[in-house]
Image (cartoon, rainbow, N blue to C red):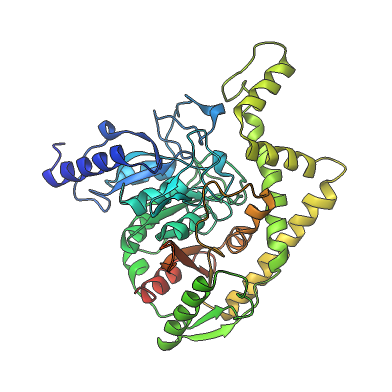
């Protein structure tokens, strides 16, 4: 196929921008592997992909030393679908190692710098993807969201970020972090293009046993703006501890919803204070089990050829950074025979209670509006903070993953002094992504 002029020009434009970028968002490019496939939904759309989603023949490292040089023998289902529909995949993005983190600073490639202010984080773990979109290095990016990793960096970079319903988009070819939470999400500046991409990559996949066999609405249905009847909102009191500029923007969106004639009611977020501990107990347990395959034998760079114990020990000690090690060790403890019932089983039960309460909420409300992040991006070299402090910032994003429901970050403004972007989050019932899209349209500036 001969590339059209506008295609070539767009490709060159992105290449130049990526080459001269100083945000460290893109870790690998593949401009020679793409071609113009005109007259399809994603023709002339350029994609960047988080470095934990497999692309045939490309390196797949999850920003980890342990996978340095590992080349994927197959493509994720989402990749094949994007390519079949005319999309061009031009490179791969930086992230927190194995998608564990909220800052995109835990990476063998070094930190991602926020395009709006290079001394700030871009959020994480899909910080490279979010920042690349904000900076204009691609049209659309894919990320993964296990506990907020698409929505949180989307918020800190001022763009749209969708976490779909669990099972809506195939995970085949996504490197597992916590399998019962992991989803592939979409990041874009442009809501229409995000919806186009969703309509292409959503749907049943026989290669993912947790994929749900349920029809995806047509593109036309996804794009039809339907006024939600009722939206659940949070009280002033509930939001008193977040950045006041974010809560101001929150209440101005609430006013906009009211003006549209949609009924709003104050709600409590169910089991709010139990969500974070439940999330971290379960995801660390799942992660410790998922990452056991990176042992220098089945996967990963082998560091030592001495006896088997040393092989494992050195490979894993040298291959992983500290945050991943911390989670593997915590997860192994949680799953150990003496503590399994006290932590793992209990957290599974609490997760069920949380899920049931959200089900009840969605019997009354079509959507919920909540913050995405309690604050704007912090300094990259913030004085050493404890891991627990970092985990606390996930407070508004983890409920959607605990319940498997879809959630969308929408851009909501900029902080006055530092001019840093932030977003807000819309939640809806499972398989009701179209409700998120409708409300996002209605809340556009
Ligand atoms: N910040 C969360 C964590 O570190 C979310 C990660 C993610 O969604 N991949 O677990």
Would you place residue 247 above or below residue 407 in this image?
Answer: below
Would you place residue 429 above or below residue 22 in this image?
Answer: below
- The residue located at (29%, 37%) in the rendering is 19
Q: Quadrant of the N terminus?
A: top left
Residue 190 drawn at (x, y percent): 32, 61
Residue 215 drawn at (x, y percent): 44, 60
Q: Quadrant of residue 161 in the image?
A: bottom left
Would you place residue 247 above or below residue 302 in this image?
Answer: below
- Seen from the viewer's position, the closer of residues 325 and 51 is 325
Residue 241 drawn at (x, y percent): 62, 71
- The residue located at (69%, 66%) in the rendering is 354
- Seen from the viewer's position, the closer of residues 347 and 321 is 321
Would you place residue 295 above or below residue 42 in this image?
Answer: above
Q: Residue furthest right?
A: 338
Question: Can the viewer see residue 339 in this picture?
Answer: yes
- Seen from the viewer's position, the closer of residues 198 and 110 is 110
Question: Can the viewer see residue 204 in this picture?
Answer: no
- The residue located at (84%, 52%) in the rendering is 342
Q: In the image, is 257 to the left or to the right of 319?
A: left
Q: Residue furthest top?
A: 306
Q: Quadrant of residue 234 in the image?
A: bottom right
């Amino acid at each position: 196929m001969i590339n059209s002029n506008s295609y070539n020009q767009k490709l060159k434009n992105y290449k130049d921008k990526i080459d001269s970028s100083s945000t460290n968002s893109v870790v690998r490019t593949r401009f020679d592997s793409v071609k113009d496939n005109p007259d399809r939904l994603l023709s002339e759309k350029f994609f960047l992909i988080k470095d934990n989603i497999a692309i045939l023949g490309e390196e797949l490292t999850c920003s980890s030393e342990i996978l340095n040089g590992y080349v994927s023998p197959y493509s994720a289902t989402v990749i094949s679908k994007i390519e079949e529909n005319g999309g061009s995949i031009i490179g791969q993005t930086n992230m927190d190692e194995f998608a564990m983190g909220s800052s995109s600073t835990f990476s063998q490639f070094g930190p991602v710098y926020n395009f709006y202010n290079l001394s700030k984080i871009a959020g994480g773990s899909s910080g490279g993807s979010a920042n690349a979109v904000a900076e204009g290095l691609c049209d659309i990016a894919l990320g993964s969201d296990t506990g907020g990793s698409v929505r949180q960096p989307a918020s800190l970079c001022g763009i749209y970020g969708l976490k779909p319903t669990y099972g809506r988009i195939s995970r085949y070819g996504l490197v597992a972090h916590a399998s019962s939470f992991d989803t592939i999400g979409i990041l874009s500046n442009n809501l229409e293009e995000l919806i186009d991409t969703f309509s292409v990559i959503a749907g049943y996949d026989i290669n993912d046993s947790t994929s749900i066999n349920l029809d995806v609405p047509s593109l036309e249905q996804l794009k039809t703006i339907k006024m939600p009847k009722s939206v659940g909102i949070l009280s002033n009191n509930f939001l008193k501890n977040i950045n006041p500029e974010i809560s101001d923007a929150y209440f101005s969106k609430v006013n906009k919803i009211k003006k549209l004639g949609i009924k709003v009611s104050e709600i409590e977020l169910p089991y709010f204070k139990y969500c974070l501990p439940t999330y971290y107990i379960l995801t660390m347990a799942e992660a410790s089990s998922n990452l056991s395959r990176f042992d220098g034998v089945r996967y990963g760079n082998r560091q030592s050829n001495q006896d088997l114990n040393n092989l494992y020990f050195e490979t894993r000690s040298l291959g992983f950074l500290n945050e991943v090690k911390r989670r593997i060790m915590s997860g192994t403890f949680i799953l150990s025979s003496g503590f399994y019932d006290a932590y793992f089983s209990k957290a599974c039960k609490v997760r069920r209670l949380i899920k049931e309460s959200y089900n009840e909420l969605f019997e009354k409300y079509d959507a919920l509006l909540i913050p995405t992040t309690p604050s704007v991006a912090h300094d990259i070299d913030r004085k050493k903070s404890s891991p627990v402090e970092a985990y606390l910032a996930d407070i508004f994003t983890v409920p959607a993953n605990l319940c498997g429901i879809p959630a969308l970050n929408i851009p909501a403004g900029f902080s006055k002094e530092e001019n840093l972007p932030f977003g807000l989050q819309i939640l809806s019932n499972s398989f009701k992504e179209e409700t998120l899209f409708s409300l996002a349209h209605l809340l556009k500036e």
